[in-house]
Image (tube, grey):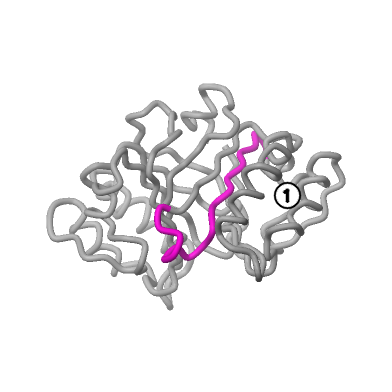
Amino acid sequence: MYKHVALLVRQEGMSHEEFVEYWQENHTPIAREIEGVTRYQTVLPTDPENAEFDGLAELYFESLDDLHAALGSPGSRDYDPTKEVAAEAREDVNNFLDVEERPRFIGEEIVQKDEVDGDTDGLYKHSAFLVRQEGMSHEEFVEHWQENHTPIAREIEGVVRYATVLPTDPENAEFDGVAELYFEDLEALYDALGSEGTRDYDPDRGKAKEAREDVDNFLAVEERPRFIGRETVQKRGTDATARGDDA
């Protein structure tokens, strides 16, 4: 499946609570009806005061053309859709988002592990927006990430679902990829991957420790935004969509 992830930043002068209220009550009912959207989920930060963003909005599409028609291409943070609901959603964005401060990512999701059969509603998620080390090509980064790091990461203690998202247009993407690790328990997430207040973390045992050590082989940790939140599925696709069978 093709996925658009928006890392949301509220407008100046708006509190996080005001942002969430508007986003959930006004914008979400529009966004879930955007043409071509097969699944839509929002992620609220577990620790808003220390989170790097106010939330994540994740929209899935069957085709990349449908995604681009609704939400624009990876080359710009702004977009100008012509379809009816997509246009309405874009106009509403101006009521609560700082578009220029809102990174986004368009990619193809690969489900690496799934013990919940795609049912992520209410799970805690660690989303890492990955930036490769200086001197490494995107292709070298992807090879190490998928071949060396992913087999370790999928076995991190407490992980019930793990997905990687590869950019559809690497040259224009803001990140080299996204790693999404789901946990049923927030303390298990913190134990494995650290808390919201820092981009780095220092697990002391098991696969979490092994994964952290391997991170130094391919990631620029200080350049890698991350987000810890609780996911709400706002619109469910087919069972295949939820499981990522078409990824």
Say whether residue 141 is left or right of residue 173. Answer: left
Q: Is residue 137 above or below residue 85?
A: below
When asked about the image quadrant of residue 9, the answer is bottom right
Q: How many marks?
A: 1
Q: Range of the magenta residues?
A: 46-63
Say whether residue 33 is left or right of residue 231. Answer: right
Residue at the limit of the structure toward the bottom, as seen here: 134
**Which one is nearer the viewer's eye here, 50 or 189?**
50
**Which one is nearer the viewer's eye here, 193 or 19?**
19
Residue at image point 59% right, 26% down: 237
Residue at image point 58% right, 45% down: 58
Q: Mark 1 = which residue?
A: 71
**Which one is nearer the viewer's eye here, 27 or 70?**
27
> What secondary structure predominates along the stretch shown in magenta?
loop
Amino acid of disc 1: Leu
Quarter of the rendering occupied by the N terminus: top right
When asked about the image quadrant of residue 201, the answer is bottom left
Say whether residue 155 is left or right of residue 165. Answer: left
Q: Is residue 232 above or below residue 129?
A: above
Residue at image point 53% right, 31% down: 246
- Residue 140: % across, % down: 42, 63
- Residue 107: % across, % down: 57, 49
Tag 1, which secondary structure? helix
